């Protein structure tokens, strides 16, 4: 059975795996990029390809940033070694194999849809909650695409005088609903951020720490605000969310749903469900395969 090598590219590592048309994954691995250089990134990709158990039909690369598909150029302000590079062309020339490239959140959205919700919904929004806030839109059963990656929801502003974002604007969701955003909420509520990360906050919440619980509640409210705005634009049957912070949803899910129902455009009430993603960190690889195979 034909397989595609799927690369989920991060800031310091690349998750990879061979995926067949049914979504089965083999050769799953995580490779560290040894140096913060583009050359080291390409070397890491080459090593992954050279050590596969079988030759893939092609490569699907999930990219952390906006991607100009037509001109093969990536906008990655938070990952300078990739910013402006021609990743598709360079990997094709290096490995002699066809490459498909797309934004990582778009591919995660498509993977979650094709291998999870395709039979039950036609319209779905998927958001990734982690280092940043990403998203993808499934509209009438298809991933929304153009000659440049679309649906950069992390750069919708909720406060024009708010925190400065890496994209150059102020108040982006990327700065409020991300890992750094939840830590900033804790700080604003009076907590010390020394050594704090979301997982330590979740341990505090588990032990009924008042400040940690309030932090997650406020985070849930911000997410509800973001999701209600997105629902007003597209009225999807589902809004699903994944990424590292989704693993902590037990501490903010109730608040998120309650606030979302209050904020949702009245005509859409009862039409939009909020759910946590099911495929976790494999969604991007599965989405890359689905798009490559034309599923």
Image (cartoon, helix red, strand yellow):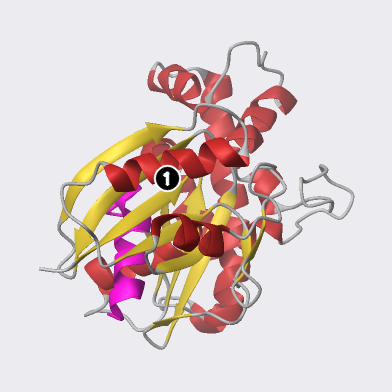
Regarding residue 108, the answer to whether it shows in the image is no
What residue is shown at x 28% (from left), y 53% (from top)?
279
In which image quadrant can residue 152 be found?
bottom right
In which image quadrant can residue 289 be found?
bottom left
Of the 4 image quadrants, the one containing the C terminus is bottom left
* Looking at the image, residue 134 lies above or below residue 165: below
The location of residue 193, given as percent across then percent down, is 66, 16
The location of residue 68, given as percent across then percent down, is 64, 70
Q: Say if the magenta span includes residue 287.
A: yes
* Looking at the image, residue 76 lies above or below residue 137: above
Instruction: Please give left or right for residue 93 compared with residue 66 in the image.
Output: left
Secondary structure at badge 1 equals: helix
Instruction: Please give left or right for residue 171 compared with residue 281 in the image.
Output: right
Pick the residue in front: 71 or 175. 71
Q: Which residue is label 1 attached to?
A: 45
The location of residue 189, given as percent across then percent down, is 70, 25
Pick the residue in front: 148 or 264. 148
The residue at the far left in this view is: 1
In this picture, which residue range is highlighted in magenta? Answer: 276-295
**Magenta stretch: helix, strand or loop mostly:** helix
């Amino acid at each position: 059975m034909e397989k595609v090598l799927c690369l989920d590219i991060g800031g310091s590592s690349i998750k990879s795996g061979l995926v067949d048309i049914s979504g089965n994954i083999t050769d799953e691995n995580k490779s560290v990029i040894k140096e913060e250089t583009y050359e080291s990134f390409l070397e890491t990709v080459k090593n992954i390809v050279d050590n596969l158990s079988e030759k893939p039909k092609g490569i699907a690369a999930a990219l952390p940033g906006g991607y100009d598909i037509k001109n093969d150029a990536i906008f990655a302000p938070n990952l300078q070694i990739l910013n402006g590079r021609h990743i598709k062309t360079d990997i094709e020339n290096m490995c002699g194999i066809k490459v498909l490239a797309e934004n990582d959140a778009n591919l995660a959205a498509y993977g979650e849809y094709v291998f999870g919700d395709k039979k039950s919904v036609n319209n779905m929004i998927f958001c990734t909650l982690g280092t940043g806030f990403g998203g993808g839109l499934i509209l009438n059963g298809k991933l929304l695409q153009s000659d440049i990656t679309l649906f950069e929801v992390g750069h919708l502003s909720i406060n024009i005088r708010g925190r400065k974002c890496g994209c150059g604007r102020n108040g982006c969701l990327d700065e409020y609903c991300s890992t750094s955003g939840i830590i900033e909420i804790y700080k604003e509520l009076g907590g010390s951020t020394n050594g704090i990360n979301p997982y330590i906050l979740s341990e505090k919440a588990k032990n009924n720490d008042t400040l940690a619980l309030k932090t997650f509640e406020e985070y849930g409210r911000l997410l509800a605000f973001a999701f209600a705005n997105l629902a007003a634009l597209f009225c999807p049957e589902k809004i699903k969310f994944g990424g590292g912070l989704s693993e902590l949803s037990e501490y903010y899910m109730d608040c998120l749903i309650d606030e979302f129902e209050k904020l949702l455009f009245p005509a859409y009430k009862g039409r939009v469900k909020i759910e946590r993603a099911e495929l976790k960190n494999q969604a991007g690889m599965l989405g890359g395969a689905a798009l490559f195979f034309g599923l």
